[in-house]
Image: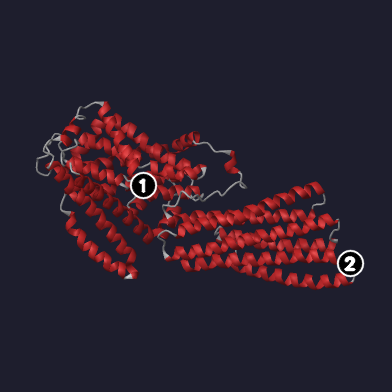
């Protein structure tokens, strides 16, 4: 086999993988928001979850993409583990469509349609309105060009193999024993793991089997190995995610391993039934008319039958699978420490940028909750008289301020990485709004810390506010806390629990109350009700509360504008 043939094989695989990726990416861009809605809304039980996984995978032509979406949703807390398991089962069925598409290559010369697709695709790309459709056509064309080239190269390689070295190699494993079967099972797993594309290995398997180089029994073992190998991707990606996401990825692996185990036990009757349905004779010689078509169809049929049967069998044991993965992957205490690190976004989950935005949104919600919790500590600090307790509480607020700064930086970095991907215009606008949100939330944290520092200076001076000042501060802080509550309700999208206009009304109330207290403070200092020093710190706190209200309104405006664009 010449080096030129090797390069043609590698190149055709590269075309195939690039086509699959381009096609999947363009479909995700065209249907990204809708897919997010479907995954979030159609998983009320395990059966609708399976249908959701089937629909989404068939739409994006990539079970890996669907699985990564699902793991991302679990990581962001948008799906429970049970819901994720059912979606993953559905994805296994949806991905079988790809094998049937590949089998078309062996039914007729699909490459005849490639060049018209390229021509139409480039026209659509230059028509900016339909650019994503053009990208999709280019992806499909590259996919079929890669498959056609792989098929042609494989046929040439076999025809030019005058020494019979290739056929002889595979004939060494023709004996029907468990070790040969296990060998091809492992080869399928390892190759899929290395290439990170079960579609590419499926294409190679179909090509080898259709030429008669690889016996069909060996081909189905490669298919089973591909089903295990394709689960490794999500486990690698989930390594940097939270416990639930790692459990979802491990459930993906467990489902396919369990399926392979039971189908190996029943392999002969199971495969014989598939062959009978397709009308394929396992002893048919490769030279027989229609052998290539039948061989490719039986592999696609076996792939479908295995995944459908495995889902129908294991769907009744979803709770047991959940308990199993929870026992294997235990939760670590430090992950529950909210002050330690970000919870919902990780650098590893960047393969679906449209959906990664949801993880950042979940992190922003947590950021907003922390700022309100920080403000609650500040309210406690106003009333605290004990020096030791005051010092501990002030130290905790300082820690939260550091967390606030870190969260802004880390979320901004994450969004910057996401924005480098292929995004729809709506998602780009959403990211810009989210960057504004985190900037304003960090400013809220700064306002809380500034109030705490003012209170710390008052504590060190051993002076105190008057009872009337305490009452006014309590009322001002209650208004600010109410504004924070409205903001958090809005970020969570609880439409029945918030009114956007109330946020603006609260901001006006805070402004008016600040002006009232400022005028009264001047009079009280002149009347010597308290010292100028206390009056200054008192107004510093009032002013920071007013600024905090402004920051809250800015967050509300950023989110409201995003919703109006997406409406």
Considering only vertical position in the picture, is 33 above or below 100?
below
Seen at 38% across and 43% down, the residue is 89
Seen at 66% across and 52% down, the residue is 400
Residue 250 position within the rendered picture, expressed as x and y whole percent measured from the top left: 43, 39
In this orientation, does residue 393 appear?
yes
Q: Taking 425 as reference, is 515 left or right?
A: right
- Mark 2 and mark 1 lie on one chain; the one further toward the N terminus is 1
Seen at 44% across and 55% down, the residue is 355
Q: Quadrant of the N terminus?
A: top left
In this orientation, does residue 567 appear?
no
C-alpha distance separating marks 2 and 1: 72 Å
Q: Taking 144 as reference, is 196 left or right?
A: right
Disc 2 on helix, strand or loop? loop
Count neighbours of disc 2 (C-alpha within 10 A) and say few if under 14, some if 14 to 19, many if 20 or more: few
Which colouring convention does the figure follow?
A: secondary structure
Q: Which residue is mark 2?
A: 529
Q: Taking 272 as reference, is 525 left or right?
A: right
> Of circles 2 and 1, which is in front?
2
Please tell me the numbered disc located at residue 91.
1
Residue 88 position within the rendered picture, expressed as x and y whole percent measured from the top left: 39, 45
Closer-to-camera residue (345/510): 345
Residue 439 position within the rendered picture, expressed as x and y whole percent measured from the top left: 59, 62
């Amino acid at each position: 086999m010449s080096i030129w043939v090797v390069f043609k094989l590698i190149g055709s695989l590269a075309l195939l993988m690039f086509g699959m990726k381009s096609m999947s990416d363009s479909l995700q861009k065209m249907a990204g928001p809708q897919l997010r809605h479907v995954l979030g809304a159609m998983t009320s039980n395990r059966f609708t979850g399976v249908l959701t996984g089937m629909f989404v995978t068939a739409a994006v032509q990539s079970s890996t993409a669907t699985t990564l979406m699902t793991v991302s949703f679990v990581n962001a807390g948008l799906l429970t583990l049970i819901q994720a398991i059912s979606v993953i089962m559905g994805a296994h069925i949806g991905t079988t469509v790809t094998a049937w598409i590949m089998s078309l290559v062996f039914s007729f010369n699909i490459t005849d349609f490639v060049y018209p697709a390229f021509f139409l695709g480039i026209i659509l790309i230059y028509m900016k309105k339909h650019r994503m459709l053009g990208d999709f056509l280019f992806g499909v064309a590259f996919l079929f060009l890669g498959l056609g080239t792989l098929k042609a190269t494989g046929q040439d390689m076999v025809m030019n193999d005058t020494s019979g070295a290739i056929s002889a190699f595979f004939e060494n494993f023709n004996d029907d024993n468990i070790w040969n079967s296990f060998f091809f099972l492992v080869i399928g797993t390892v190759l899929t793991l290395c290439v990170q594309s079960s579609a590419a290995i499926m294409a190679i398997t179909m090509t080898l089997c259709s030429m008669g180089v690889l016996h069909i029994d060996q081909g189905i073992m490669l298919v089973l190995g591909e089903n295990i190998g394709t689960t490794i991707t999500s486990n690698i990606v989930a390594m940097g995610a939270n416990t639930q996401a790692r459990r979802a990825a491990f459930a993906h692996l467990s489902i396919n391993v369990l399926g392979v185990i039971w189908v190996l036990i029943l392999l002969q009757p199971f495969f014989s039934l598939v062959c009978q349905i397709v009308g394929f004779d396992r002893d048919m010689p490769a030279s027989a008319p229609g052998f290539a078509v039948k061989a490719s169809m039986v592999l696609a049929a076996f792939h479908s039958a295995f995944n459908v049967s495995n889902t129908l069998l294991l769907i009744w044991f979803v709770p047991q699978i959940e308990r199993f993965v929870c026992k294997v992957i235990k939760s670590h205490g430090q992950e529950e420490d909210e002050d330690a690190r970000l919870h919902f976004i990780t650098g590893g989950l960047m393969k679906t940028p449209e959906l990664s935005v949801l993880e950042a949104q979940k992190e922003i919600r947590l950021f907003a909750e922390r700022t309100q919790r920080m403000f609650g500590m500040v309210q406690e600090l106003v009333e605290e008289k004990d020096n030791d307790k005051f010092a501990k509480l002030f130290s905790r607020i300082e820690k939260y301020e550091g967390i606030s700064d870190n969260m802004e930086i880390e979320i901004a970095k994450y969004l910057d990485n996401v924005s480098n991907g292929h995004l729809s215009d709506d998602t780009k606008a959403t990211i810009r709004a989210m960057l504004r949100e985190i900037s304003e939330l960090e400013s809220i944290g700064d306002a809380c810390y500034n109030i705490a520092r003012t209170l710390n200076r008052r504590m060190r001076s051993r002076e105190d506010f008057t009872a009337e000042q305490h009452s006014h501060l309590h009322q001002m802080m209650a208004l600010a806390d109410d504004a924070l509550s409205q903001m958090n309700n809005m970020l969570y999208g609880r439409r029945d629990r918030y009114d956007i206009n109330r946020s603006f009304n609260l901001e006006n109330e805070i402004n008016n109350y600040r002006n009232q207290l400022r005028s009264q403070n001047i009079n009280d200092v002149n009347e010597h009700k308290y010292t100028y020093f206390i009056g200054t710190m008192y107004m510093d706190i009032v002013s920071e509360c007013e600024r905090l209200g402004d920051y809250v309104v800015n967050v509300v405006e950023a989110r409201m504008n995003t919703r109006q664009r997406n409406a």
